Image (tube, helix red, strand yellow):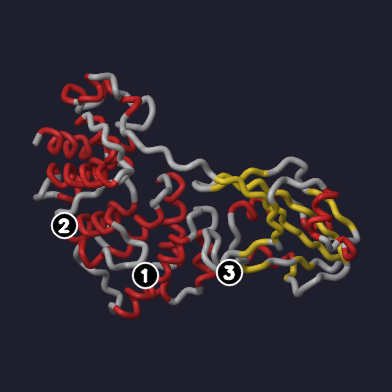
């Protein structure tokens, strides 16, 4: 098939030298695929290298404390990936004796592994004919074949999976899957692709019909919700502060944060004290940022203020400020810690 042969030929010349492409070890492949979910390679590569260095085998990762895993993951976001990563490592190490499932069907049973990840591991490690479909693949197929079915619709997912399965090289599924993803990443880019240098140009429907800019089609998601966070950053004269572990379900589950007051709007100092209704124990209150720091997540925008509270005593047990770097925190909190000079406040 034209597109199949062209992509594999292109890949043999243009592929990037990435560490997970030099191994068939399912632990390394699985680790790279989980890290690269919702993450670009340039951001994910240092994390992959850090995990491999600290946890060279699935047994090492399985025996790690969850907080250590979350700390190493800090900054990547979508922390459920890290929790699932740790849970799956323990399952593979302790229930499967360190042996990853070797089929697409069985890989799907692992926590945090969906269609794409199972297809990737099955083809890369075990040469199973399982077509991968990620954002890059959607884009290449939608443009080449001129498909206007939304990629995030139920119908679209079926259409593109069937098409990817139809054109996969059954004799070399690993290289084909790598090729079509790589092609989407560095040749058929989301915006301003260099179509004149594209080996698929002559047969590309989107190029012929001038639809490059509108394909692939995606149904717009709901508008993100606005939330208003007020973090209470306690600082005592003897170098103590308070960090709390987030409980329950949520994107920051089991991460640490400063005590939080969530409100329905952004507050000034008078409104903040009234809302808190606890101004009697505040000896010195200042606002770190007068303008809200807006932390954008896929489904919500966090409008955040950090309130600095200098006090001689804490309302609950605290931690030494000198130990704060040992705790896994969301990137929003990490950025504040990096910007705020705790030592100057003691």
Residue holding disc 1: 88
Tell me where residue 177 appears, x and y as whole percent. Answer: 22, 47
Query: Considering the numbered disc 2 on the image, is that residue within a helix, a strand or a loop?
Result: loop
Say which quadrant the C terminus sits in: bottom right
Q: Nearer the viewer, residue 82 or 323?
A: 82
Residue holding disc 3: 247
Residue 192 - label: none
Q: Quadrant of residue 53?
A: bottom left
Q: Is residue 105 above or below residue 40?
A: below
Image point (28%, 39%), residue name: 138
* Mark 2 neighbour density, 10 Å: few (under 14) some (14–19) many (20 or more): many
Q: Nearer the viewer, mark 1 or mark 3?
A: 3
| Nearest to N terminus: mark 2 or mark 1 | 1
Image point (43%, 50%), residue name: 44
Tell me where residue 284 appears, x and y as whole percent. Answer: 89, 57
| Nearest to N terminus: mark 1 or mark 3 | 1
* Mark 1 neighbour density, 10 Å: few (under 14) some (14–19) many (20 or more): many
Spatial separation of the CA atoms under disc 2 and disc 1: 22 Å
Tell me where residue 334 appears, x and y as whole percent. Answer: 63, 54
Q: Is residue 64 above or below residue 341?
A: below
User: As drawn, is 105 to the left or to the right of 191?
Assistant: left
Spatial separation of the CA atoms under disc 1 and disc 3: 21 Å
| Nearest to N terminus: mark 2 or mark 3 | 2
Residue 127 - label: 2
Q: Nearer the viewer, mark 2 or mark 1?
A: 1
Query: Considering the numbered disc 3 on the image, is that residue within a helix, a strand or a loop?
Result: loop
Query: Considering the numbered disc 1 on the image, is that residue within a helix, a strand or a loop?
Result: helix
Spatial separation of the CA atoms under disc 2 and disc 3: 41 Å
Image point (66%, 68%), residue name: 244
Tell me where residue 328 appears, x and y as whole percent. Answer: 59, 63
Q: Quadrant of residue 207?
A: top left
């Amino acid at each position: 098939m034209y597109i199949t042969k062209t992509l594999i030929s292109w890949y043999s010349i243009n592929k990037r030298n990435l560490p997970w492409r030099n191994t068939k070890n399912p632990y390394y492949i699985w680790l790279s695929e989980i890290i690269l979910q919702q993450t670009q390679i340039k951001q994910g590569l240092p994390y992959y290298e850090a995990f491999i260095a600290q946890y060279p085998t699935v047994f090492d990762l399985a025996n790690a404390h969850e907080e250590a895993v979350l700390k190493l993951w800090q900054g990547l976001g979508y922390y459920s990936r890290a929790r699932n990563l740790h849970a799956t490592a323990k399952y593979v190490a302790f229930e499967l004796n360190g042996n990853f499932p070797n089929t697409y069907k069985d890989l799907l049973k692992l926590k945090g592994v969906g269609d794409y990840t199972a297809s990737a591991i099955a083809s890369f490690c075990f040469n199973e004919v399982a077509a991968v479909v990620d954002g890059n693949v959607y884009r290449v197929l939608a443009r080449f074949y001129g498909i206007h079915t939304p990629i995030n619709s139920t119908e679209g997912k079926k259409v593109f999976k069937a098409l990817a399965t139809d054109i996969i090289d059954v004799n070399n599924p690993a290289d084909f899957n790598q090729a079509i993803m790589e092609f989407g990443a560095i040749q058929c880019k989301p915006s301003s692709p260099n179509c004149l240098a594209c080996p698929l140009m002559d047969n590309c429907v989107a190029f012929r019909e001038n639809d490059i800019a509108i394909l692939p089609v995606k149904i717009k998601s709901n508008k993100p919700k606005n939330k208003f966070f007020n973090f209470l950053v306690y600082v005592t004269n003897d170098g103590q502060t308070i960090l709390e572990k987030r409980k329950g379900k949520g994107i920051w589950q089991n991460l640490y944060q400063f005590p939080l007051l969530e409100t329905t709007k952004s507050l000034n100092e008078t409104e903040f004290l009234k809302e808190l209704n606890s101004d009697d124990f505040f000896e010195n209150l200042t606002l770190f940022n007068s303008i809200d720091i807006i932390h954008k997540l896929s489904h919500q925008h966090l409008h955040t203020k950090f309130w600095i509270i200098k006090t001689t005593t804490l309302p609950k047990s605290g931690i030494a400020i000198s130990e704060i770097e040992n705790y896994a925190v969301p990137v929003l909190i990490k950025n504040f810690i990096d910007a705020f000079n705790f030592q100057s406040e003691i």
